[in-house]
Image: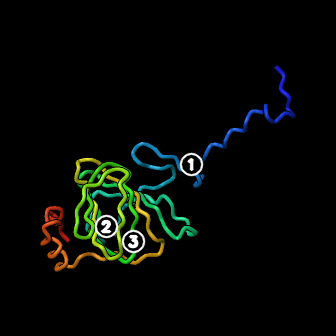
Amino acid sequence: MSVDLKDKSKAVPARATPARDDDARFRAFADGFEWSGVERLPYKEEGSAPFKSISRQILFADPKLHCELRYFEMAPGGYSTLERHEHVHAVMILRGRGECLLGNSVRAVKTNDLISIPSMTWHQFKASAGEPFGFLCMVNAERDKPQLPSADELASLKADPRLAAFLANYRS
Ligand code: MN
């Protein structure tokens, strides 16, 4: 069979160059909720705040974005820090089910649910459904440091009947 090399309509399309592991433009998703070339980091500095069994992966952090997209994942029984701050979070649950404390409410949340965390609003995520629980979190690149509840603030949060069960085992 002869092929007319001048006829581009019959030319075999060039194959896309396979992404190299060090090509930060393409990051393949893999089992275990990992992305090629993305490191699974500790959630925070150990001892800086209360948290349990949670990891952090920075998915996007280009300075030109002025924001970062991170993926946090908790093992069953794990939880994020109970905190508040001036900056806001835009959260999408990506894996599993769990619970979220936000302000004066506690909600069961599941894959694909969206959670908007306003300024200075107490928030905490908990993998309370016996399965891994992960979420995407968009945040400003420049942001204030999270505040932890004082003993008095924690006591008043625990005194709220809507939050009492969620916070029952919480120690600051
Ligand atoms: Mn936060």
Q: Is residue 60 left or right of residue 18?
A: left
Q: Which residue is mark 2?
A: 46
Determine contact: label 2, label 1, CB under 8 Å: no
Is the residue 70 above or below the residue 131 in the image? below
Q: For the residue labelled by badge 2, is the local secondary structure a helix, a strand or a loop?
A: loop
**What residue type is disc 1 on?**
Asp
Measuring from the top left, give residue 69's x and y in whole percent.
46, 62
Label 1 vs 3, first from the N-terminus: 1
Q: Say what amino acid the circle numbered 3 marks.
A: Val
Where is the N terminus found, in terms of image quarters?
Answer: top right
Residue closest to the eye, 59 or 129: 129
Viewer-nearest of discs 1 and 3 = 3
> Which picture quadrant has residue 106?
bottom left
The quarter of the rendering in which ligand 1 is drawn is bottom left
Amino acid tagged 2: Glu
Near-viewer residue (102 or 142): 102
Residue holding disc 1? 21
- Would residue 53 appear left or right of 155 to someone viewing this image? right
Label 3 secondary element? loop
Quarter holding residue 170: bottom left
Label 3 environment density (alpha carbons within 10 Å; few <14, some 14–19, many ≥20): some
* Circle 1: element type: loop
State the residue at coordinates (23%, 50%). 129
Residue labelled with disc 3:
88
Identify the mark nearer the N-term, 2 or 1: 1
Residue drawn at point x = 51 percent, y = 52 percent: 37
